[in-house]
Image (cartoon, rainbow, N blue to C red):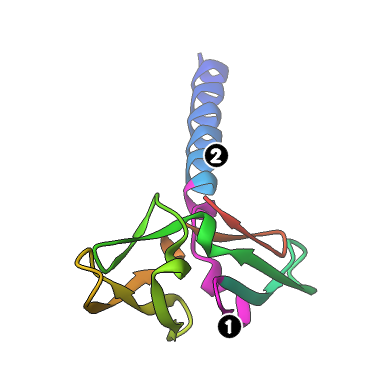
Amino acid sequence: MLKVCATFFCAIFLTFNLLIGNAWAAGGFSQTCSNVSVNGSALSANCQRANGYTTSKTSIDLNRYVGNIDGTLKWGDSRFSLTCQQVGLAGKNRLRAECERSDQRSYLGSYINLDEHIANIDGSLKFE
């Protein structure tokens, strides 16, 4: 009976660790990356490798994942850079831009938290 209980608790512990490990992988690139910059729609940074000692220069095209919906930066759409200007960073993890509204005459300042979906996977920026 003791072996059964021990096996059960070990299985629960391992399952919990796998679930937590996967949750930590989603987004959060700014915690392990430095020298973060934006040039056009490209986000670049020096990101820590999984060994914790080395970094690599990496970039990702945000145009594939971020869109402009009536002047607001949104995940799940694409090609924000076609209708947004003055693109840059606000802090280390927020993309900022002046984006064209649907009336095509006015612009709205917008921000999006890149840590929500951009992750550092072994020194490479990835969308999750």
Q: Is residue 28 magenta?
A: yes
In contact (CB < 8 Å): disc 2 and disc 1: no
Pick whichever, 76 or 8, lies toward us: 76
Question: Would you place residue 83 above or below residue 23 in this image?
Answer: below
Q: Which residues are magenta?
A: 23-41
Tell me residue 51's x, y (percent). 77, 64
Residue 18, label in figure: 2
**CA neighbours of label 1 inside 10 A, class few (<14), some (14 to 19), many (20+):** some
- Spatial CA distance of label 2 from label 1 is 32 Å
- Whether residue 56 is visible, yes or no, is yes
Which residue is label 1 attached to?
37
Picture residue at 53% right of the left edge, 16% below the top = 4
Q: Which element type, helix, strand or loop, lies under badge 2? A: helix
Which of the 4 image quadrants contains residue 103? bottom left
Which of the 4 image quadrants contains residue 74? bottom left
Mark 2 or mark 1: name the one nearer the start of the chain. 2
Picture residue at 52% right of the left edge, 19% below the top = 2
Question: Would you place residue 23 above or below residue 93 in this image?
Answer: above
The amino acid type of the residue labelled 1 equals Ser
Picture residue at 43% right of the left edge, 64% below the top = 80
Q: Say whether residue 45 is left or right of residue 95.
A: right
Tell me residue 119's x, y (percent). 56, 60
Q: Which element type, helix, strand or loop, lies under badge 1? A: strand
Picture residue at 51% right of the left edge, 36% below the top = 13
Pick whichever, 36 or 73, lies toward us: 73
- Whether residue 32 is visible, yes or no, is no
Tell me residue 49's x, y (percent). 74, 66
The amino acid type of the residue labelled 2 equals Leu
